Image (cartoon, rainbow, N blue to C red):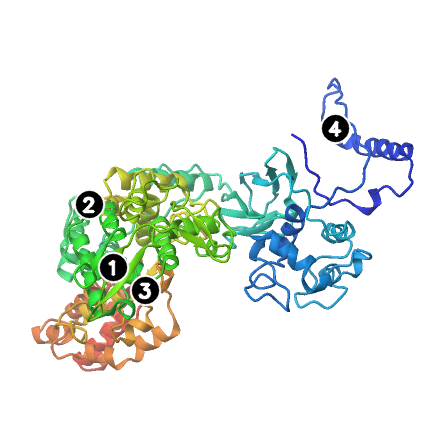
Amino acid sequence: MPTVGNGFRSNALRPAAGRSAALRQSLAAWLVALVAPALVPADAPADQPDTPASVAAPHAPPAVHFENDIVPLFSKLGCNSGGCHGKSAGQNGFRLSVFGFDPRADYDALVKEARGRRLFPGDPEESLLVAKATGRMPHGGGRRTAPGSADHELLARWVRQGMPWGDEHAPRLASIRVEPAERVLAMRGDQQLLVTAVYSDGSVRDVTAASQYTCNAAALAEVDAAGRVSVGEVPGEAAVTVNYRGQVGVARLIVPQPDAGEPYPDLPQNNPIDGLVWAKLRQLNVVPSPLCDDATFLRRVSLDTIGTLPRADAVRAFLADARPDKRDRAIDAVLERPEFADYWALVWADVLLVDREALGERGAFALAGWLREQMAANRPYDEWVRELLTAAGNSGRHGPVNFYRAVRTPEETTRAVSQAFLGIRLDCAQCHHHPFDVWGREDFYALAGFFNGLERRPLGDGRELVFSSGYRPASIPMTEQAIPARPPGGPAAADLADGDPRTKLAEWITHRDNPWFARLVANRLWSHFLGRGLVDPVDDLRATNPATNEPLLAWLAGQVIEQDYDLKAVMRLIVSSRVYQLSADVNESNRDDDQNFSHHLVKRLPAEVLLDAVCQVTGSSEDLPGLPPGTRVIQVWDNRLPSYFLDTFGRSERTSPCECGKSNEPTLSQALHLMNAPELQAKLSDPEGTVARLLAAGVSDRAIVDALCLAALGRPADDKEADVAERLFAQASRRAAAEDFLWTLLNSYEFLFVH
């Protein structure tokens, strides 16, 4: 294939004016003689045939093309980023389009604005563009390129050539190739990436130096501006995203643990999940932790599945059960508990924006209640999503209608639907081409067209009538270019004028062939139970953010479809695996692994689950304003219910479908609240609470200690806890000692975390 020159030539090789053709040919012959020996491998056999080589005589530098050469340079140097001249108001009077999405506007800004003062073809080095970029003149962004560099030469040559736009018929960028696409590297190794641009006429160009690089795993690898990747001493997999003029590619780098010299163990499997995880761990030479003990398993599966601690009597019965299938029996039992619907309605309410502030009390109550009905009936996921996407009617009577009241504009709806059900983050594409994905403005407004005809009419009492008035294509702002409605990556929808266009979209989203729908929910479930998504963030599915175990995610997505979107069945597969049941304790092999599930990842209890757990262990219910006594926090539909505890422990504000709206990270204020809050002390000393009932029963001190440990930690007291309790009971009254011991348990790591 012909090769398009990249224009990065050294001044030393440029022929001087009047230099003879013979001299240029002599120079070329000298270069061949100099380079040719290096082209023959040292160990090449003597009888290897010679390969003819030639170097063409250098010619005048090629004409610079603004869109193909200068715009990528601005992106590489950060000039058109949102923090510099690419922000909406520009910077210091000069504005570029973000990431170069509008090359024509950028050209006009440079060449025509401010009477062309930024460019001086008579002396390119004195142009503001060149002088500021090289640091010869003061520049708020600092020096962006070194004097004498290839980037400097390219800018100066473009000005010297008269700032041309370039040939209107020049080939257009079609795609990029990143090599190697995948590579196994030893610890502390490095790898130079090669980025090749492929153009519309089949020509190619090496654009390694002009590309931008980011790495998704800073603990494993780092990449410099030249595309050289260096890895450290942490085993795992890193993905390097490469961006060149809106085209993106990815290189995956696998870093195995050094071979310990011992044979890799033969690991048992409960289901295919285990085999797929073990295969990845074997590739990395990482050995998984052993299974957790029975008490840890029961507590873990109860909290993860129904957001509820197991009762003390259930723990005793499970620990005494000698049947080999008791864990499978426990899984089946917990999946049928009534708390399942409460807890998973809460989980989905966080994603689907059930916010009382946006919906009003009636709307939030209706949507939360509808979600609980879907969970209680175990309705197939695709069915209830279709109903939600096509919902219309009175918001006070039909719960799912309220989703379209939480998102008021076609643009808001586009962002929410694409992220919540497809794992596609289209936010960036609303204004410019996505910097890490294939989506552009046309993709964003093509999806917005499905919602452009939605109307909302007030009915009084905080209710609204939501309905579709028919199909109206959306237009890209400023251009007023109408874009036919189509889903991301899908074909243009047909017959949109017939009825509600959302019906066509819902059919496409929930179709079995959709590449994102089943994949996203499989990743959501995996993240919920294992503490981290196979793709992380969980709702950011793109080629440049690959799964840490692609075969496993593909298998799970296939199971979602094969199980007819029965999410409870998929949950059963996940929690039945040995991978889910591994201990959180690490070994020397997997100590640094936090992405391949070689041990269980510890996570803090969510705010609502934690408050319920405190109430359950202390035997003192939370006083929830406006709700019946005994209502559990995971049953509460109102995310704005006044609660300092829930605010402190990071409940979701439900303003975005991103799960980052809910925080499970521990903070100092949380620790101080648990240690000092008078509300917690009131629960400990409740005259009808757990401590009071145990004392009234007249049981021994050791029985009290065991009962409290069973309630809070899901196991009997160990020797250390028994020793501490014995000293407490010897120094204070039985009530004070029991309350202090329980206070200690509620502040312990083992109580606050799922492990």
Task: From the image, state whether disc 1 or disc 2 is nearer to you.
Answer: 1
Q: Amino acid at mark 1?
A: Val
Q: Residue at x 30, y 62 (%)?
A: 353
Question: What secondary structure is found at the residue carrying circle 4?
Answer: loop
**Mark positioned earlier in the residue sequence (4 or 2):** 4
Residue ID for mark 3: 654
Can you give x and y, in whole percent of width and height, for residue 389 in the image? 27, 51
Mark 1 nearby-residue class (10 Å; few <14, some 14–19, many ≥20): many
Cβ atoms at labels 3 and 2 below 8 Å apart: no
**Mark positioned earlier in the residue sequence (1 or 4):** 4
Q: Quadrant of residue 451?
A: bottom left
Q: Amino acid at mark 2?
A: Asp
Q: Residue at x 76, y 60 (%)?
A: 127
Distance from Cα at disc 1 to Cα at disc 4: 74 Å
Q: Quadrant of residue 702?
A: bottom left
Q: The N terminus is located in which quarter?
A: top right
Distance from Cα at disc 3 to Cα at disc 2: 35 Å
